[in-house]
Image (cartoon, helix red, strand yellow):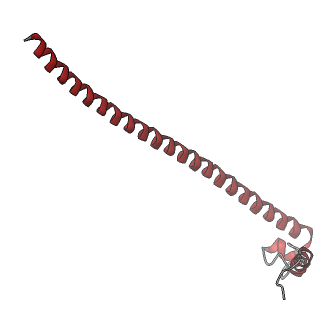
Amino acid sequence: MALRLSTKQIMKNSYAFISSLGELGAGSGSGGGTGGSIRDAGGIFGRMEAAREEQYFRNLSNEQLQAMKRDNEQLQAMKRELDSLRDANEYHEQEMEWHAWVIENNKKRLAELAIKLETIVE
């Protein structure tokens, strides 16, 4: 027996759950719960207050999400800069090794030429 639920079944179950809560702000004991005297009274003011609360938390959630996205973008930019600096350091270290090798070879060549020059001059 498969444990897969169709989208239609999921929506039906979700609707049944949500409808059992009642209407937000509809008064004490309903989906609005006891959110204060205005919400306890129910009616249009209770529903308006519930809608304002929902909007507040939706806005707060969106602000937090935007802040997280900005922080993530900054983090990614810092990681790219770090990688770039590491690559530059590696390149320059290789260049330093190359130049040290060239300097050493030039010193050897200078010493050889100095010996040859001394033998010619004598």
- 81 w.r.t. 95: above or below: below
- 79 w.r.t. 50: above or below: above
Residue at 23 percent across and 24 percent down: it is 109
Q: Residue furthest top?
A: 121
Return the x and y of residue 76 as percentages of the image width and height: 58, 48
Q: Quadrant of the N terminus?
A: bottom right
Which is nearer the eye, 1 or 44?
1
Return the x and y of residue 40 as percentages of the image width and height: 83, 76
How many numbered discs sit on the rendered protein? Answer: 0
Q: Which of the 4 image quarters holds residue 24?
A: bottom right
Which is nearer the eye, 39 or 12?
12
Which is nearer the eye, 61 or 88?
88
Q: Which of the 4 image quarters holds residue 38?
A: bottom right
Q: Residue furthest left?
A: 122
Return the x and y of residue 87 as percentages of the image width and height: 47, 41
Q: Is residue 114 left or right of residue 95?
A: left
Residue at 87 percent across and 75 percent down: it is 41
Which is nearer the eye, 33 or 4?
4
Q: Which of the 4 image quarters holds residue 107?
A: top left
Residue at 57 percent across and 50 percent down: it is 75
Residue at 35 percent across and 34 percent down: it is 98
Q: Quadrant of the C terminus?
A: top left
Q: Is residue 94 left or right of residue 27?
A: left
Return the x and y of residue 64 as percentages of the image width and height: 67, 57
